[in-house]
Image (spheres, rainbow, N blue to C red):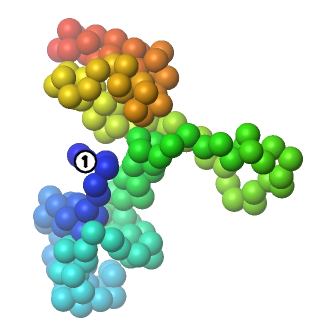
Amino acid sequence: MDFKDIHIGKLIQLRVNDLDISIERICNFLEINELEVSEMYESKEINTYFLLRWSKLLEYDYFRLYSQHLILYSPPSNINKKNSKSRKSRLPDFRKHIYTREVIHFILELISSGKKTKLEIINDYKIPKTTLYKWISKNSSNKLGS
């Protein structure tokens, strides 16, 4: 999975094919026609209303793909440091570093394939050293136990 370049329409179409969902069911659920469904499959972007509907229909959290993109590719936030005296946001505050199995697998694959070193992973993705080494240790334990 390429978390850097997300083509949401293609990912939705893959899931539809995997689940073998009929176009009639999709059209009824989304309240759109077949042409609009086809256009969504070709689209790299989908508005959040439809992304939520797709997530429900296909029982897959497509928003998490974007969260993982933020974890891997966004610079660390300096908002708290710059505006320590400013007002608190009324929006919910989420922890940034919640790693899914897919992200952990992605990172470990980069290391095992030699595409990145451990130091590059730590610097490029701001993953704490101890976290990375725990993943590596668990991954090697799982392979030994298999």
Q: Locate residue 121, reporting x and y percent.
A: 36, 27
| Image-based side of 1 in relation to 71, left or right | left
Residue 35 visible in the snapshot: yes
Label 1 crowd (10 A; few <14 / some 14-19 / many >=20): few
| Image-based side of 82 in relation to 112, left or right | right
Residue 117 higher or lower than 8, as above or below: above
Q: How many marks?
A: 1
Q: Residue at x 36, y 59 (%)?
A: 62
Q: Locate residue 16, reporting x and y percent.
A: 19, 66
Residue 49 higher or lower than 121, as above or below: below
Q: Locate residue 14, reporting x and y percent.
A: 17, 61
Q: Locate residue 105, reporting x and y percent.
A: 28, 32
Q: Judging from the image, what secondary structure is the residue with disc 1 in? A: loop
Identity, as a three-letter code, of the amino acid under mark 1 = Asp
Residue 138 visible in the snapshot: no
Q: Residue at x 28, y 10 (%)?
A: 141
Q: Residue 50 occupies which quadrant of the picture?
A: bottom left
Quadrant placement of the C terminus: top left
Depth order, front residue of 79/27: 79
Report which residue position mark 1 lands on: 2
Depth order, front residue of 125/23: 125
Q: Residue at x 41, y 44 (%)?
A: 73
Residue 24 higher or lower than 137, as above or below: below
| Image-based side of 39 in relation to 29, left or right | left
Q: Residue 110 occupies which quadrant of the picture?
A: top left
Q: Residue at x 19, y 65 (%)?
A: 10
